């Protein structure tokens, strides 16, 4: 059964387009009903990023949750991993993050976490979707059983202490100049403060949210501003988070970008040497570079691949007993500490290695030479371009041309009407030709 509302990362779309107050209210009611178990007072933690539409969605969801008898704890702008952590530590029945992650301010979304801080399974999402399409009038709480809502303070300090505790007690960031780009998003308060408390010389950018500038020419999806600032300040490292801080990209002292695959390599090798890997391997998606796989093999470690989406990485980690996984885009999951991707905690693990080795970030974070990888997006309005016969033929021909010396990955995005075409191989010119041919066929089919 295909899902009507939920994509690969919650419900996401244009604010006041797909994500309306009516939908937010109904999601609050449906999720609230789905997570009512037992006779206790049920409660939900709601966090958000800094988008203008967050106010509208937040209050609509409060109305939805309280109408089915759930108490609401509002924590304001907080990173997605902080909301997941607070859901568990505050013994809430449900957690909500109002965010469209790395998208621009016009979009927004609703991410849901279960009582243990994990994203919901497909089965639970289907259950909520079923309730969304029903009339819930007869399932609302009686007048005396309505929920209450209140804002709670002190949660920033909780997350800062949690993040600091992921490092060895005696480790300090003294002597490191760190530029941190918070994407004018959810981490704009907590991350610069935590870095400063750990002893770093902190240069914060992307910390002046106005409701409109989240992810705009800043953050992990636009790291050029960070690269420039690192060079200007002669910093040792740059950290770029996205709008809800569940992903991270680093920049070395030369201003060069370090992606999630290199971060996974750094942490995997460090954890292996320290005996901290739960299994001799890590989990990553089909997008991760073949260079990472070869590097890990040289370390005696496996790379287990999953479909794109951090939820699939986490599912494989849990079922296979792995404690490190992630995506090339910078979603890094460290299950010893967190139940979801945490950009800041992942960055701290790399900073710990930098401090331990006392070598420049450009050396520490270059563990392998990535194979040439070409990724292009084709936007479409309707239909199923991937079912077109010319498209299928172009993909088949491309696979024959690569002939085992590379790979192709063509998939529909789970969050927007886009088809992503990725080619990888040792011969960059050949890979580009193959990708361009497929993109051209997709463009004609989409038109």
Image (cartoon, helix red, strand yellow):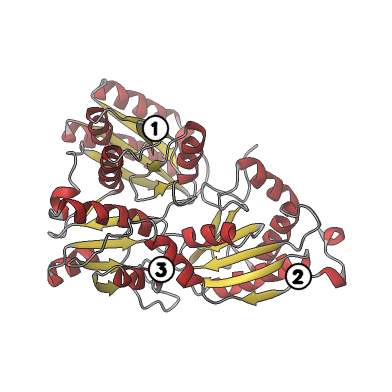
Q: Are marks 3 and 2 in contact (CB under 8 Å)?
A: no
Using the numbered discs, state the Cα–Cα distance from disc 1 to disc 3 in whole angstroms. 31 Å
| Front tag of 1 and 3 | 1
Mark 3 / mark 2, whichever is N-terminal: 2
Query: Which residue corresponds to mark 1?
Result: 279
Image spot of residue 149 (x, y percent) = 68, 74
Is any part of residue 132 visible from this angle?
A: yes
List the residue tagged with mark 3.
187
Residue 223 visible to the viewer: no
Question: Residue 152, percent across and down?
Answer: 58, 75
Query: Measuring 71% from the left and 68% from the top, which residue is drawn there?
Result: 71
Query: Does dot 3 land on a helix, a strand or a loop?
Result: loop
Where does residue 446 sit, x and y in percent of width and height? Answer: 44, 43
Mark identifier at residue 145: none
> What secondary structure is found at the residue carrying circle 2?
loop
Image side of residue 60 versus residue 145, left or right: left
Residues packed near mark 2 inside 10 Å, few (<14), some (14 to 19) or many (20 plus) = many
Give how far apart the Cα atoms at labels 3 and 2 are: 29 Å
Q: Quadrant of the N terminus?
A: top right
Residue picked out by circle 2: 147
């Amino acid at each position: 059964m295909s899902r009507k509302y939920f994509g690969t990362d919650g419900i996401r779309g244009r604010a006041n387009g797909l994500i309306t107050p009516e939908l937010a209210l109904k999601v609050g009611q449906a999720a609230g009903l789905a997570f009512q178990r037992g006779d206790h007072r049920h409660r939900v933690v709601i966090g958000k990023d800094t988008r203008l539409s967050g106010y509208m969605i937040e209050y609509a969801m409060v109305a939805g949750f309280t109408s089915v008898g759930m108490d609401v704890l509002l924590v304001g702008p907080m990173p997605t991993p902080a909301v997941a952590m607070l859901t568990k530590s505050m013994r809430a029945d449900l957690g909500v993050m109002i965010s469209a992650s790395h998208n621009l301010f016009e979009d927004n979304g609703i991410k849901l976490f279960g009582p243990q801080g994990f994203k919901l399974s497909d089965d639970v999402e289907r259950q909520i979707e079923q309730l969304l399409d029903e009339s819930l009038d007869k399932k609302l709480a009686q007048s005396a059983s309505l929920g209450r809502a209140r804002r709670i303070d002190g949660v920033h300090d909780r997350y800062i202490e949690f993040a600091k505790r992921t490092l060895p007690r005696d480790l300090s960031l003294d002597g490191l100049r760190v530029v941190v780009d918070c994407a004018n998003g959810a981490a704009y308060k907590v991350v610069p403060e935590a870095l400063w408390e750990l002893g770093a010389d902190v240069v914060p950018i992307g910390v002046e949210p106005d409701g409109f500038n989240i992810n705009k020419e800043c953050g992990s999806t636009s790291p050029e501003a960070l690269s420039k600032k690192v060079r200007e300040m002669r910093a040792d490292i740059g950290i770029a988070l996205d709008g809800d801080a569940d992903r991270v990209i680093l920049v070395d002292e030369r201003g060069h970008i370090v992606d999630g695959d290199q971060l996974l390599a750094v942490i995997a090798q460090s954890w292996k040497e320290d005996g901290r890997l739960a299994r001799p391997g890590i989990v990553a998606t089909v997008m991760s570079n073949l260079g990472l796989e070869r590097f890990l093999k040289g370390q005696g470690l496996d790379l287990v691949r999953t479909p794109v989406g951090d939820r699939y990485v986490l599912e494989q980690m849990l079922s296979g007993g792995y404690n490190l996984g992630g995506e090339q885009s910078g979603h890094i999951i460290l299950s010893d500490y967190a139940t979801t991707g945490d950009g800041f905690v992942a960055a701290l693990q790399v900073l710990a290695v930098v401090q331990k080795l006392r070598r420049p970030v450009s050396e520490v974070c270059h563990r392998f030479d990535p194979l040439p990888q070409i990724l292009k997006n084709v936007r479409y309005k309707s239909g199923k371009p991937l079912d077109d016969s010319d498209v299928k033929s172009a993909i088949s021909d491309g696979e024959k041309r690569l002939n085992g010396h590379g790979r192709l990955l063509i998939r529909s995005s789970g969050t927007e009407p886009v088809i992503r075409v990725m080619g990888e191989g040792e011969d960059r010119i050949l890979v580009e030709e193959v990708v361009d041919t497929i993109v051209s066929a997709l463009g004609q089919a989409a038109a």
